C-alpha cells in the first residue's frame, strides 16, 4: 500500500513508458525545502563569523563599519531564505518499472537516468536534519564511474522505503 | 581436492635482497663511515651482522607466506606475528596475470597477480614462483585446468589462436611516431643537474665560445640553435623508439576460448588475460600523424584489474584497419563503419568557437585598445573558427545495432564503441550557454573508466539528446 506521494511519482510512468525521457518528473517532498534551508543556515554560519571578525578588525582600525557585515547578511539571507525553494523547484524525480530519473541543477541542468537493472545496491540514509524533517536520501550504487553514486534526496521516509523495495525487487528479478 | 600449502620459490629470497640492495647501499655506506672510527674489524662485523639479519628477516617472511589451492578457493596465509589468512573463491577471480621482471628472468621466476575486480588493494600477489608453477596456477585458478602438480598444463587449455602480433619492424615504425619532446626536456634538465656536479656548465660553453672570435657569435648562435634543435629532434626520436621497444617488443595477442591473452615487453615481460565478458567498450585511436598514414591503436576498457591508469588495455597499439577489425571481431565487436554516424548540432561550432576563441578574442581586443599593433593578432581569429567547424564535422555519433558509436577529435581522432548493455547510467546536462543555444550533452557512464576520454556526445539538439538518452537505455 504505497502512500499517495508514491502513487503520484510512479503512476504516470506507466502511461509514458515508451517516451521515457519525457517522463513527467514529480517534485520531491516539500519538507526537503526545510532541509535545504537548515543546511544553508549551517553553511552561512562561517560566512557570518568571518564577517563579524572582519568588522571587529575594522572597528579597531577606525575604518567604516557595517559594509562587510551588511554584505554577509545579504548573502546569508539569500542562501537561507530565497535560494532553497528555487533549488527545490529544479529537483525532479520519477520511477517506472525500468528506469529511475532524477533531475536537478539551476545553472547547469542535469537529468540522470539509471536503469534499475544496473543498480548494484541501495542505501537509505538520513542525516540529523533530514530525520528532524521526516525525509530520507536514497543512494543508488552502480558499477559506473561518474555516476557510481546517484543520490535521490528529499523523499518522504515511507516513500523512500517504498522506492527502495521496488528497486530491490526489480534487481532480484533481473537476470544478472 | 585440498593440496598441501605451498611456499613461494626459495629464489625469491635472493631476488628480494638483490632488489632491495640499491636502497640499502646508501645506509650501509653511512653506517660503515660511522663505525669506521672504531676500527676495521668491528665495522665489518656490524655490517655483516646487519646483512645476515636482513637475510634472516627475509627468510622468515618467506617462510611465513604460504598459499593453498583448496576446494574452489585459494587460501593465502601471511604474516609473522600478525597472521593473516585470505580466502579467494575461484569464481571471484577476474584475472590472473603473470609478469616477469628483468631480475627474475635469469631465475626463471615470475610474479602471479590475482585480480578480484575490487581495485588494486584487493588483489593478491604471489611474488615469485617458477614459470611452470605460474602457468599451472593460472590454469587452476581460472577453473579450466586440472588440479595437478604436473607442469604440462597446455594440453587441457583451449586452443590458442593468434589474433594480432607486432614484428620488430612494426615496433620500430611505431617508435618513430612515438616521438616525444618530453624526454628531451627530461634529458636536458638531467644534463643541467649533472653539469652542476661535474663542473660542466652551459654558461662555460658560451664563455668558451666567446674566447674565440666575437664576430663568429653572430653566425655561430643560429648555427648552435639549429644544431641543438637537430640534436633535440634526434633525442626525441631515439627516446620514442627506445620507449616503444621496451614496452611493445614481441607484442602478441591471442584468443583462448573466451579470453584474450596479451604478452609484451622487452625487459619486463608482462602477460595479461582479459575475459571477454569483462570488456566494457572499445576505443580506436588515430594519432595526429600516424592516423593520417592509416595506423590506429585499439584499447579495450575492462572492469578493474588493469595495469594502466586509463583502465583500458591496449590490445593493438599500432595496427592497420583490417587488423583492428580482426581484433574487434575476436573481442566480439562488429567492425567500425563511419558511414551511419551523423554530426552533432551546428550549435557545437558556435559553442566551441565561443569557449575556445572567445576569451583570447576579448584579450586581443583589450590589448589592441592599449597597443594598436596587437590588433594584428585578430588575423589569428579564423584559426579557432576553423577548428570549431572541424570539431563539429569530426564529432559524430549513432546507435548502430546494439552499440553506441561516438567519434571525436580534430587532429587526433578517437572512436568509441560502447555496447548498450554496458551503459551504467546516462545523464543529459545543459549548461547556461547550452540552454541559450538549445543544446545538451549526453554523458554516458560505463564501468571501469578512469581519467579523461568518455564516450560523451557533446552538443546535440535538446530533443535529439532526449531521444538518444531514451534509446541508449532500451
Image (cartoon, grey):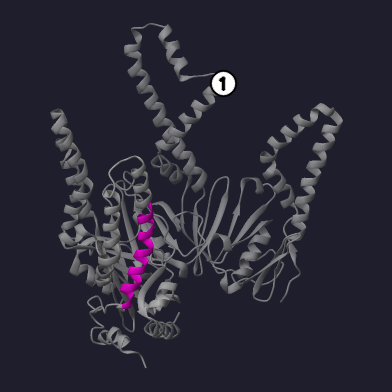
Q: Is residue A19 above or below residue B412?
A: below
- Horizontal side of B272 relative to B456 (left or right) equals right
Of residue B347 and residue B93, the one placed in the foreground of this image is B347
Q: What residue sits 31% from the left and 73% below the top?
A: A33
Of residue B309 and residue B440, the one placed in the foreground of this image is B440
* Helix, strand or loop status at disc 1: helix
Segment colored magenta: A31-50
Q: Quadrant of residue B22?
A: top right
Of residue B149 and residue B370, the one placed in the foreground of this image is B370
Q: Is residue A101 above or below residue B273?
A: below
Find out whether residue B387 is within the magenta segment. Answer: no
Q: Quadrant of residue B342?
A: bottom left
Q: Position of residue B28 (x, y in %)?
A: 73, 36
Q: Position of residue B171 (x, y in %)?
A: 45, 45
Q: Quadrant of the C terminus of chain B?
A: bottom left
Q: What residue sits 18% from the left and 37% below the top?
A: B364
Q: Quadrant of the N terminus of chain B?
A: bottom right
- Horizontal side of B303 relative to A13 (left or right) equals right
Find out whether residue A37 is within the magenta segment. Answer: yes
Q: Position of residue B36 (x, y in %)?
A: 80, 28
Magenta span dominant secondary structure: helix
Residue with the mark numbered 1: B198
Q: What residue sits 21% from the left and 59% below the top?
A: B432
Q: Residue A145: in sight, yes or no?
A: yes
Amino acid at each position: 500500500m504505497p502512500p499517495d506521494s508514491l502513487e503520484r511519482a510512479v503512476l504516470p510512468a506507466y502511461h509514458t513508458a515508451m517516451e521515457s525521457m519525457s517522463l513527467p518528473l514529480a517534485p520531491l517532498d516539500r519538507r526537503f525545502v526545510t532541509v535545504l534551508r537548515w543546511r544553508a543556515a549551517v553553511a552561512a554560519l562561517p560566512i557570518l563569523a568571518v564577517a563579524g571578525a572582519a568588522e571587529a578588525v575594522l572597528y579597531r582600525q577606525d575604518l567604516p563599519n557595517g559594509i562587510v557585515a551588511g554584505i554577509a547578511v545579504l548573502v546569508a539571507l539569500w542562501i537561507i531564505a530565497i535560494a532553497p525553494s528555487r533549488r527545490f523547484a529544479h529537483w525532479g524525480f520519477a520511477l517506472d518499472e525500468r528506469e529511475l530519473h532524477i533531475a536537478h541543477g539551476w545553472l547547469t541542468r542535469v537529468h540522470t537516468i539509471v536503469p534499475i537493472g544496473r543498480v548494484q545496491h541501495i542505501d537509505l540514509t538520513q542525516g540529523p536534519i533530514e530525520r528532524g524533517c521526516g525525509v530520507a536520501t536514497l543512494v543508488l550504487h552502480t558499477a559506473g564511474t561518474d555516476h557510481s553514486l546517484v543520490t535521490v534526496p528529499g523523499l518522504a521516509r515511507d516513500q523512500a522505503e517504498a522506492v527502495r523495495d521496488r528497486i530491490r525487487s526489480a534487481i532480484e528479478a533481473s537476470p544478472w | 581436492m585440498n593440496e598441501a600449502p605451498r611456499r613461494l620459490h626459495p629464489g625469491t629470497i635472493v631476488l628480494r635482497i638483490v632488489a632491495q640492495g640499491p636502497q640499502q647501499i646508501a645506509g650501509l655506506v653511512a653506517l660503515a663511515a660511522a663505525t669506521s672510527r672504531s676500527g676495521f674489524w668491528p665495522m665489518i662485523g656490524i655490517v655483516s651482522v646487519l646483512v645476515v639479519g636482513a637475510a634472516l628477516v627475509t627468510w622468515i617472511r618467506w617462510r611465513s607466506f604460504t598459499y593453498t589451492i583448496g576446494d574452489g578457493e585459494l587460501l593465502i596465509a601471511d604474516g609473522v606475528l600478525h597472521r593473516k589468512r585470505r580466502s579467494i573463491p575461484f569464481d571471484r577471480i577476474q584475472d590472473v596475470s603473470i609478469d616477469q621482471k628483468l631480475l627474475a628472468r635469469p631465475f626463471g621466476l615470475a610474479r602471479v597477480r590475482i585480480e578480484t575486480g575490487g581495485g588494486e588493494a584487493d588483489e593478491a600477489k604471489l611474488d615469485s614462483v617458477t614459470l611452470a608453477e605460474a602457468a599451472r596456477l593460472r590454469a587452476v585458478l581460472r577453473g579450466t585446468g586440472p588440479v595437478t602438480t604436473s607442469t604440462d598444463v597446455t594440453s587441457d587449455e583451449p586452443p590458442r589462436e593468434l589474433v594480432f602480433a607486432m614484428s620488430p619492424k612494426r615496433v620500430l615504425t611505431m617508435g618513430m611516431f612515438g616521438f616525444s619532446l618530453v624526454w628531451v626536456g627530461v634529458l636536458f634538465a638531467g644534463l643541467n643537474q649533472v653539469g652542476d656536479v661535474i663542473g660542466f656548465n652551459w654558461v662555460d660553453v658560451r664563455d668558451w665560445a666567446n674566447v674565440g672570435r666575437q664576430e663568429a657569435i653572430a653566425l655561430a648562435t643560429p648555427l648552435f640553435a639549429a644544431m641543438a634543435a637537430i640534436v633535440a629532434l634526434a633525442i626525441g626520436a631515439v627516446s620514442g623508439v627506445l620507449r616503444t621497444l621496451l614496452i611493445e617488443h614481441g607484442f602478441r595477442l591471442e584468443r583462448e576460448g573466451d579470453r584474450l591473452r596479451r604478452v609484451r615487453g622487452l625487459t619486463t615481460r608482462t602477460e595479461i588475460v582479459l575475459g571477454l565478458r569483462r570488456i566494457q567498450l572499445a576505443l580506436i585511436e588515430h594519432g595526429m600523424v600516424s592516423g593520417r598514414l592509416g595506423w590506429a591503436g585499439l584499447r579495450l576498457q575492462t572492469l578493474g584489474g588493469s595495469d594502466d591508469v586509463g583502465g583500458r588495455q591496449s590490445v593493438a597499439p599500432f595496427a592497420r584497419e583490417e587488423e583492428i577489425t580482426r581484433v574487434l571481431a575476436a573481442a566480439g565487436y562488429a567492425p567500425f563503419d563511419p558511414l551511419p554516424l551523423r554530426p552533432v548540432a551546428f550549435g557545437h561550432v558556435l559553442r566551441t568557437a565561443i569557449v575556445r576563441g572567445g576569451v583570447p578574442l576579448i584579450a586581443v581586443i583589450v590589448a589592441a585598445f592599449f597597443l594598436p599593433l596587437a590588433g594584428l593578432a585578430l588575423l589569428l581569429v579564423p584559426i579557432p573558427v576553423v577548428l570549431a567547424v572541424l570539431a563539429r564535422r569530426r564529432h559524430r555519433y549513432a546507435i548502430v545495432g546494439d552499440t553506441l558509436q561516438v567519434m571525436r577529435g580534430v587532429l587526433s581522432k578517437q572512436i568509441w564503441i560502447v555496447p548498450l548493455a554496458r551503459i551504467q547510467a546516462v545523464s543529459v546536462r545543459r549548461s547556461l550557454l547550452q540552454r541559450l543555444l538549445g543544446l545538451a550533452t549526453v554523458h554516458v557512464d560505463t564501468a571501469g573508466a578512469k581519467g579523461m576520454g568518455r564516450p560523451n556526445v557533446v552538443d546535440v539538439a535538446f530533443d535529439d539528446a532526449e531521444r538518444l538518452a531514451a534509446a541508449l537505455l532500451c
